[in-house]
Every structure is written in C-alpha cells, then in structure tokens.
Image: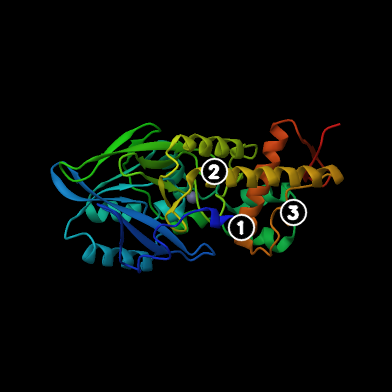
Amino acid sequence: MNSLEHQLDYPLGDALPEPGRTLQIAPGVRWVRMSLPFALDHINLWLLRDEIDGRAGWTIVDCGITNDATRAAWEQVFADELDGLPVLRVIVTHMHPDHIGLAHWLTERWNCRMWISATDYNAARLASTSTTGFGGGSAASFMASHGLTDPESIAKIKARSNYYASMVPQVPERFRRLMGGDVIRIGPAGDKHDWVCHAGYGHAPEHMSLHCPLLGLLISGDMVLPRISTNVSVIDLEPEANPLPLYLASIERLRALPADTLVLPSHGKPFRGLHTRIDQLQAHHDERFADLMTACAEAPQSAADLLGVLFRRKLDLHQTTFAMGESIAHLNALWLAGKLERMLGSDGVYRFSPGR
Ligand SMILES: [Zn+2]
C-alpha cells in the first residue's frame, strides 16, 4: 500500500460506481467497476461515447475476467447505461486476464473489433492455447532455481498449468493493432477527441495507455496506480528479462503529460497527481534496490531469501508467485547493471552478491 497516498488528490472523493452501473467522469466518459476473485478485488473499465462507420455507440476500454458474474454485470450495463446504443469497439490496454478476459465474448456479442498492441495480442493467444508454458512445471522449476524449494509450494505451482487459460479461455480471432504514438479519434460525430496511445513496458509485453489532451484524461491501465505499485515480474518464459528499467523508463515518459491530468487507473480511484505518483514509484523502487544491495552485501541471497526484505507481510501462494517474480526483477536489474554477481550453487539455486 502507498503510505504517501495523501499526496494524491481524489476529485470524486469516495464515490464509486455501483455494480452494473456507471459514473460519469467527463462528458461521454463513464466509469464501470467490476469485481475480481483475487486479493485485488476489482477492476475499473471505461466507456467512451463514440461513432464508427456512421453508427452511434460506445467504445469499451478493458473487459473484466471471464466468469458469469462479470457477464451479468455487463448485461446490466448494456441494458441501463448505454442510452440504448450498441458497443462499437473494444480497446484492451494489455493481455492480463482481468483486462482481456471477456474480449472474445464482448466482440462476438456486439460483432465489433478488438484493438490492442500486436505484442500483447500474440502473447494472449499463445498463453490462452498453450498447455506447456505459462505456469506448470516450467514455472515451478524456474521458481526453484531462484530458491523457492518448499515441496508444497512447488507442487501447487506445478498443478496450476492452465491458470491463464482458465481466465482467458478464448481470444478474439482478429484484432486491430495499436502502436505507441497512434492517435485514435473517439467521440460522437462533431465532437470527436484525439486519444494518444502511450506504449509502456515492464508490466505487460506492450501495454497501451490512452491520453486525451483536450479532456485532460489519462486511461493509465496498470502502468500508474494510486495505491499499489504496478507488478513488474520476471516469469519463466524469459528468465533473464530485465523489466524494471523498462517500467521505470516508461513511467518517466509519462511525465511529459500535464501535471493536472486526471488519471483513470485500472485499480483504485481516479486521481490527480501524476507527477507526484511517478516520483513515489521511482523512490519506492530505489528503496527496494538499496535494501537488496544491503542484504546481498551481508551474504549471498536468492530471490526467495529476499521475500522477507521486500514484503514485510504474510503471503499466500498466489501472492508468493507474484512476489518471487518481483524479487527476481529487482535482482536481474542489479545483476544486469553490473552491481550484483549471480552464482549458481551446487544445489541448483542462483544467489546474488556484490562483485569483488
Ligand atoms: Zn496487468
């Protein structure tokens, strides 16, 4: 949790949209909140009034997870909140299950196109159909090589081989590609606004945030969140990945946006204070780096050894796998910058220490 949250401004106060209802953020911009069956118990989705090919309707940004409760909540939104107009387009910020989960259902139900980065589209298709990668044995041996060796956790991770596919059973068969710098015109005829795509890296393969300069709004997706720090993890698919510098450079680029931008995050409440939040996130990771350097200077450490340094609370298995990914991300960043050395022990576990 962000102990400096009081430095941010929540212009809507504690107002939240009721389940199946929307809350207006700006003319033609509505906020939907769907529940999630995780510790992170909700996701924010956005409705933008639009017109495409001469048809009036709505663009949806992000979809929610695939389950009956989310489908039912969407049906209520369709019945009560769209002014009788159809959905014309589905924009997906990135390939994680809470964002892309129902894209296949939404695009089929409304016979419309999904817009997403090509990198995330392909990663989602692969993860949704793969029976070998993305969890299971490969994830278990990767975690074990970073010191998570207790048999109970390893058995549970091994058993979770179709975790992604269970939440994203299908991905639309066609898509329209989004790239950083693209400008999408969204709005009803005569009142269209530019929404600029900002590519972000380190959290997902190629995450798209959407900025509307005229309305002063940033749909930040998961790249900038007010209460929690964005998950930046190394996973078994790319063991030597270095996502943290990518993430930090991505949010640094968002500093070019005006300081009074109203940020619409995927989790938490709309807030002002984008530059302050970027400062907080950068300081947070600097502290983590310093803590890890101190611990590794005392004795060589594995990613699992460092969970107690990074996360001072009890973690369940789901949280432990995220935490391991984050621990490895910090270690890989220091290792690949030449600040730590990596040694493979005779027990098959990587440990990190400052070089000689
Ligand atoms: Zn995400």
Vertical comparison of 27 with 53: above or below: below
Give the side of residue 335 with respect to residue 195, left or right: right
Residue 293, given in percent of the width and then of the height, sits at 77, 42
Secondary element at tag 1: loop
Q: Position of residue 4 (x, y in %)?
A: 59, 55
In-front residue for pair 282/19? 282
Furthest residue in direction left, as rendered: 54
- According to the picture, the residue beneath numbered tag 3 turns out to be 309
The quarter of the rendered structure image containing the C terminus is top right
Q: Callout 1, which amino acid?
A: Ser
Q: Where is residue 99 in the image (x, y as percent from the top left)?
A: 41, 52
Is the N terminus in the top left, top right, bottom left or bottom right quadrant? bottom right
Q: Is mark 3 on a helix, strand or loop?
A: helix
Disc nearer the start of the sequence (2/3): 2
Q: Are discs 2 and 1 less than 8 Å apart at CB?
A: no
Please report the residue visible at 30 percent of the width from the left and 62 percent of the height from the top: 22
Ranked by sequence position, the earlier of labels 2 and 1 is 1
Q: How many labels does the image show?
A: 3
Residue 171 visible in the current orientation: yes
* Circle 3/circle 1 CB separation < 8 Å: no
Labels 2, 3: front one? 2
Badge number at residue 278: 2
The answer to whether any part of residue 299 appears in the image is no
To which residue does mark 1 refer? 3
